[in-house]
Image (spheres, rainbow, N blue to C red):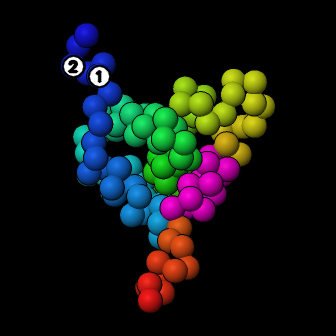
Amino acid sequence: MPKTDRYPFRPDLRAKLVEVASRGETLNYLQLGVGRAMIGRYLLRIAREEAVAGRPPLTAVVVRKAGGIPGEGFREAMIQVGFIDDSDRDDERTVWERALRETHEYWRPKLMDDLGRS
């Protein structure tokens, strides 16, 4: 298999996405700081890892600089990782909005974490 067909795991990117998600924010593809050729592969691998762990698609926090929504193919990626079923009729934006909401809710710090533990 050629090297470009692999889906390497990037724990540094995942950590960045967790940080962004826990603040209830998004970031654009350029802010990831990785080459454009591999971004999709890195994000798909992270989304797969999250799905296996039973978490929402952390990659929903990554959007285009222009427009503030993910690139084309987000819906298809969500089918591949099992976030939605192929029979789901929601459009790309609706799927993304649901994924982003669930991701922010999952990663939002808990009240006790915000206040510190006694």
Q: Could you tell me which quadrant the N terminus lies in? A: top left
Q: Nearer the viewer, residue 16 or 64?
A: 16
Question: Which residue is painted at 67% across and 42% down in the image?
Answer: 95
Residue 96 in the image: state x and y as whole percent: 62, 46
Amino acid type for the residue under numbered disc 2: Lys
Q: Residue 14 magenta-drawn?
A: no
Q: Could you tell me which quadrant the C terminus lies in? A: bottom left
- In which image quadrant can residue 93 be found? top right
- Labelled pair 1, 2 in contact (Cβ < 8 Å): yes
Residue corresponding to mark 1: 6
Question: Which residue is painted at 53% across and 46% down in the image?
Answer: 55
Q: Main secondary structure of the magenta part?
A: helix
Q: Residue 106 magenta-drawn?
A: yes
Amino acid type for the residue under numbered disc 1: Arg
Residue 25 seen anywhere in this rendered image of the structure: no
CA separation in Å, label 1 and label 2: 6 Å
Question: Which residue is painted at 63% across and 57% down in the image?
Answer: 101
- Vertical relation: 70 (above or below) 84: below
Query: Residues in magenta?
Result: 96-107
Question: Which residue is painted at 34% across and 37% down in the image?
Answer: 42
- Horizontal side, residue 92 vs residue 30: left or right: right
Residue 33 seen anywhere in this rendered image of the structure: yes
- Horizontal side, residue 38 vs residue 86: left or right: left
Residue 3 numbered mark, or none: 2
Mark 1 burial class by Cα count in 10 Å: few <14, some 14-19, many 20+: few
- Vertical relation: 1 (above or below) 90: above
Q: Determine the residue located farthest toward the left in the rendered image.
A: 3
Number of numbered markers: 2
